[in-house]
Amino acid sequence: MKSFVTLTTDFGQSDYDVGVLSGVIWQIAPGAEIADLTHEIQRHNVLEAALVLERCTPYFPEGTIHVVVVDPGVGTQRRAIAARLGGQRFVGPDNGFITLVRQRALTENQPVEFVHLNRPRYWLPNVSHIFHGRDVFAAAAGHLAAGVPLAELGDPIDDPILLDIPTPERTAQGWRGAVVHIDAFGNLSINLSLRQMQGALIRTVRIGETQIDGLVRTFGEKEPGELVALFDSSGKLCISVVNGSAAARLGSQTGDAVEVTLG
């Protein structure tokens, strides 16, 4: 059966590091199909990696192996881990990148299994102190793609590091959320979902001193340059500027508060 592997890193595209990950995997599993999910995670931003995985992994086939190298703790005592979460597998540092996909698997009563990658026979022979992405994670992913069972890669663990994910709060008028992600277009993703609205209509969305009245369904409903709020393709509330950048317009950062009034 064909093996699928994705790569998510904060490496950017200007250096050779991304290509080397694929080379290691292909050395071990020559038939693996590899997709670059993104290499533009903000440097060291584990929360952003967790959000990207939550949104993207449901669109990959069962059995896909997701390698994540957003690893500010490389070379320290932090563990290297691999996991089965639902029907997919994950490899990377034990720093919380799996928080949201683990939460989804638990909510859906799907399998959850973690191992500590502590068996050197599944690493490259020479391990750098600063490039575990190549020497440990890519190698482990290659062995998974070649058919090695997850349990063979290391000892089982049940205490992975989990991130403290910002959660929205109910208010008397609606919800108080926060900006949790800003994409390359400057769209502000809010930690509020269409599901949480339970059919209620959004009357206003406020960020800082700026208020947006109502929602649009798509960008083209307004003129270029207008500030809009809508639910994005992942069902998350989003603040955008039509053909522009909401982040630049508003000077927004992750963590900024957003007030939603229902009506």
Image (spheres, rainbow, N blue to C red):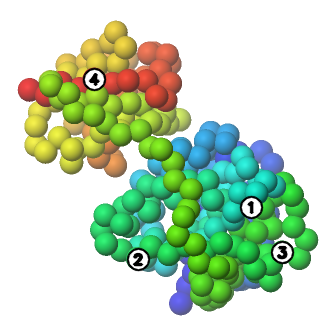
Q: Is residue 250 above or below residue 231?
A: above
Mark 4 highlights which residue?
259
Name which residue lies at 59% across and 82% down.
150
Which amino acid, by three-letter code, is at mark 2?
A: Pro
- Classify residue 142 as left or right of residue 53: right
Mark 2 highlights which residue?
111
Query: Which circle's residue, 2 or 1, is located before the other in the chain?
Result: 2
Q: Is residue 114 above or below residue 102?
A: below
* 2 vs 3, front mark: 2
Q: Secondary structure at mark 1?
A: helix
Mark 1 highlights which residue?
133
Q: Secondary structure at mark 4?
A: strand
Mark 3 highlights which residue?
124
Per the model, the C-alpha gap separating discs 4 and 1 is 39 Å
Inspect this view and state whether residue 244 appears. no
Per the model, the C-alpha gap separating discs 3 and 4 is 50 Å
Which residue is at the far top?
209
- Classify residue 179 as left or right of residue 253: left
Query: Which circle's residue, 4 or 1, is located before the other in the chain?
Result: 1
Q: Secondary structure at mark 2?
A: loop
Kindly indicate whether the residue at mark 4 contacts the one at mark 3 (C-beta within 8 angstroms). no
Per the model, the C-alpha gap separating discs 3 and 1 is 11 Å
Q: Nearer the viewer, residue 62 or 259?
A: 259
Q: Residue 105 in the image: x percent, y percent? A: 38, 67
Q: Residue 168 in the image: x percent, y percent? A: 31, 36
Per the model, the C-alpha gap separating discs 2 and 3 is 29 Å
Query: Which circle's residue, 4 or 2, is located before the other in the chain?
Result: 2
